[in-house]
Image (cartoon, rainbow, N blue to C red):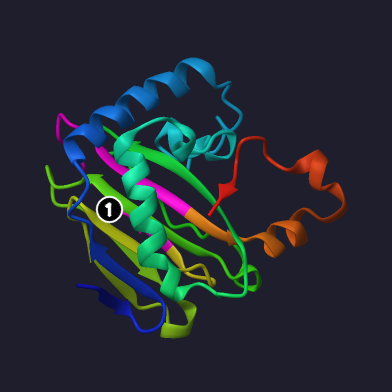
Amino acid sequence: MRNEHIKDYLWSEMVPSIDNKTLMHNCLLIEKFLEERLTPLLDNDISYSTFTGREYNQYNLFTFPSLELNKLFAEIKRLTTPVLNSKESYMFQSWLNVYRDNGFIDWHGHWNSKFNVIHGFYCVNTEDVSSYTEYMLPTLNEDITTVHSKDGLLVFGKSDNDKHRSSLGWNSLNPRITIAFDIVPTTSIQEKYKNNFFENFPFNHFIPF
């Protein structure tokens, strides 16, 4: 059953088909792989307390071979398609957030509203300690909307000048793990990079959606 947290803007729905224990194991293996293989480019960006989130533009999580990731990709596509423009083609980018030792991400936004992007995340391991994500929209007088975490919950909505942040205070032995993603119209990617497309476009960043 779909929940509408902000009218015509933010939704969530449980995805019961994913084995989150297996997915958590896969995510931790991928985290280790990325830490060993990627050269840190954004060490000065302290807004991210997780390496895999900070270096999001160097990889796409869904290019890793994993049955649970494949199943999750299909579910994301199924559940978000009704809010996409049927006349557009889309690309997909995803990264991993692994929070330990009270790690979190502070208030931040994603794409500018003119690009018509959908942003979302999936809760892999978020229940060991009560956690949530907060959203703030200028059009709602900056009132805060709270979405409480639940393993297996998919949250998605428009990227239209909102800001959001994860909750503080995670202190479990197991890390808080979420999988974040952007669904971006192909035309918006072309508009953003324009004449410098092949010079500035991040390698291995987007896959077809």
Q: Sort mark 1 into few (<14), some (14-19) or many (20+) by Cα contacts within 10 Å.
A: some
Closer to the camera, 179 or 20?
20
In-front residue for pair 80/97: 80
Q: Position of residue 205 (x, y in %)?
A: 60, 41
Seen as rendered, the residue at the extreme right is: 195
What residue is at 40 percent from the left and 37 percent from the top? 49
Residue, x 14% and y 51% (percent of image)? 130
Q: Which quadrant does the N terminus fall into?
A: bottom left
**Is residue 44 visible from the viewing direction of this image?**
yes
Specify start and end residues of the magenta stretch as a single range. 164-181
Magenta-span inclusion, residue 173: yes
- In this rendering, would 155 be left or right of 182? left
Q: Position of residue 53 (x, y in %)?
A: 45, 39
Decide if residue 107 is on the left or right side of residue 167: right
Direction from residue 190 to residue 74 in the image, left or right: left
Tell me which amino acid carries mark 1: Ser
**Residue 102 vertical position relative to residue 111 in the rendered view, above or below:** above
Task: Identify the residue under disc 1.
Answer: 167
SS at badge 1? loop
Residue 30 in which image quadrant? top left
